[in-house]
């Protein structure tokens, strides 16, 4: 039992890798956009080792901007970096055109707060949502009839009844039921001969033109899955 739980967790981790690249791509886009904006807006602020904007934390180059944003995403003194980017901060000498020119802007409030909110509450939750969705799918009890079985039945039925007449040929029923997973259907592993015997035992109503109805087929499957015994007229039982 413990081994089964560990296998489920490992399989959830593996299945999550299929969706995690899309989340990672979103993170890369977010960091790229904010890094470029940061270089344009805060890239001229003077570097001072006594301030949060220093030789290790600055927006003067793209790699440094990405590293600074990564630090902000972890929540380490991001508000201090934001305050260091406000107006009336000294500029780098190479960027000065006038002696009294100062760098920084109030846009720093919107820039850093929005970036931290997106990283802390959106990106991390996306990772958690992907993992939890796969875990729920793998641990779901598929033996219990639920809405997902009805959705699967309607989706596969529509392939055999594209005009939505509510009826299909009785020859297609076996193929249809083998495509539907148990407990509602037979599953693809069910041999054709066994599927035919099970279909006959269901006593499904057959129309004079050799077709079966949607409702009659669905009710017969549900009745069989739940092992409900009926007597008399099958249409009245359905």
Image: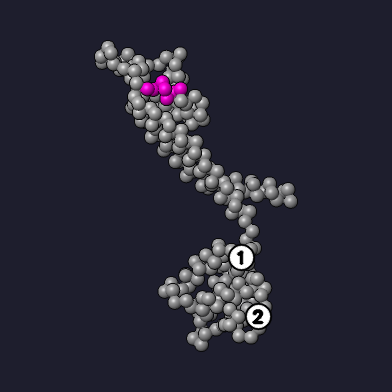
Query: Dot 1, how many residues are within 10 Å of its Cα: few (below 14), some (14-19), or many (20+)?
Result: some
- Tag shown at residue 188: none
Query: Dot 2, how many residues are within 10 Å of its Cα: few (below 14), some (14-19), or many (20+)?
Result: few
Residue 113: give x, y in percent of width and height: 43, 32
**Residue plotted at (38% across, 34% down):** 33
- In which quadrant of the rendered view does residue 64 lie? top left
Residue at the disc numbered 1: 145
**Residue plotted at (62% across, 48% down):** 11
- Disc 2 and disc 1: Cα gap in Å? 19 Å
Question: Element under label 1?
Answer: loop
Q: Is residue 80 above or below residue 236?
A: above
Q: Nearer the viewer, residue 168 or 69?
A: 69
Residue 232: give x, y in percent of width and height: 64, 86
Quick one: which residue is furthest to the left in this view?
98
Q: Are marks 2 and 1 in contact (CB under 8 Å)?
A: no
Residue 84 in magenta?
yes
Question: Element under label 2?
Answer: loop
Q: Nearer the viewer, residue 99 or 173?
A: 99
- Tag shown at residue 230: 2
Q: Earlier in the sequence, mark 2 or mark 1?
A: 1
Q: Is residue 59 above or below residue 217?
A: above
Q: Which residues are magenta?
A: 80-86
Residue 215: give x, y in percent of width and height: 53, 76
Residue 11 in magenta?
no
């Amino acid at each position: 039992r413990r081994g089964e739980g560990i296998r489920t967790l490992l399989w959830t981790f593996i299945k999550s890798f299929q969706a995690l690249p899309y989340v990672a791509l979103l993170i890369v886009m977010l960091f790229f956009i904010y890094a470029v904006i940061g270089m344009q807006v805060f890239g001229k602020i003077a570097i001072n080792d006594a301030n949060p904007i220093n030789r290790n934390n600055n927006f003067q180059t793209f790699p440094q901007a990405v590293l600074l944003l990564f630090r902000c995403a972890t929540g380490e003194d991001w508000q201090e970096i934001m305050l260091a980017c406000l107006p009336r901060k000294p500029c780098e000498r190479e960027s000065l055109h006038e002696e009294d020119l100062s760098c920084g802007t109030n846009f720093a409030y919107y820039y850093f707060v929005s970036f931290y909110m997106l990283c802390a509450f959106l990106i991390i939750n996306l990772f958690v949502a992907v993992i939890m969705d796969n875990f729920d799918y793998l641990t779901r009890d598929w033996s219990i009839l639920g809405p997902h079985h009805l959705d699967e039945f309607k989706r596969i039925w529509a392939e055999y009844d594209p005009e939505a007449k509510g009826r299909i040929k009785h020859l297609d029923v076996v193929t249809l039921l083998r495509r539907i997973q148990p407990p509602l259907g037979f599953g693809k592993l069910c041999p054709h001969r066994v599927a035919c015997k099970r279909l006959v035992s269901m006593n499904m109503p057959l129309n004079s033109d050799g077709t079966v109805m949607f409702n009659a087929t669905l009710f017969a499957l549900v009745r069989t899955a739940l092992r409900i015994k009926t007597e008399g007229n099958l249409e009245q039982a359905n």
